[in-house]
Image: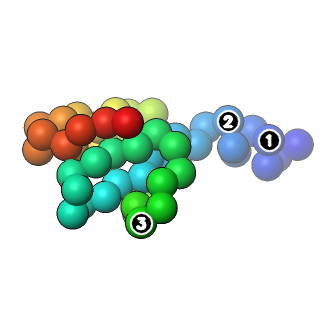
Amino acid sequence: MEKAVASENLWRVWVDTSRRIVSFHEEEGCKLLEFRSRELFLSCVDQYTGMQYRYQ
């Protein structure tokens, strides 16, 4: 039961810095970033937006 609760509070993005892409699904060649805080996740998304990364 504990694992189910932990996975509910997990936000993930995959980042490819060479192509400047942030993906919300697993993508080959991308680095996985995991967040246990919604605020940190949104802050990360904000930072990549500011650097003009595109999302898929």
In the figure, is residue 41 to the left or right of 34? left
Q: Position of residue 19 (x, y in %)?
A: 22, 56
Q: Secondary structure at mark 3?
A: loop
Mark 3: few, some, or many residues within 10 Å (few <14, many ≥20)?
Answer: few
Residue found 18% across the figure and 36% down from its top: 49
Name the residue furthest right: 1
Q: Secondary structure at mark 2?
A: helix
Residue named by callout 3: 29
In this rendering, the answer to whether 39 lies above or below 12 is above
Q: Amino acid at mark 1?
A: Ala
The label nearer to you, 3 versus 1, is 3
Where is mark 2, residue-wise?
8
Residue at the disc numbered 1: 4
Which amino acid, by three-letter code, is at mark 2? Glu
Q: Nearer the viewer, residue 16 or 7?
A: 16
Rendering coords of residue 26 (x, y %): 53, 51
Q: Earlier in the sequence, mark 3 or mark 1?
A: 1
Residue 1, by quadrant, is top right
Q: Is residue 34 above or below residue 51?
A: below
State the image coordinates of residue 29 (x, y, percent, origin top left): 41, 66
Does dot 1 land on a helix, a strand or a loop? helix
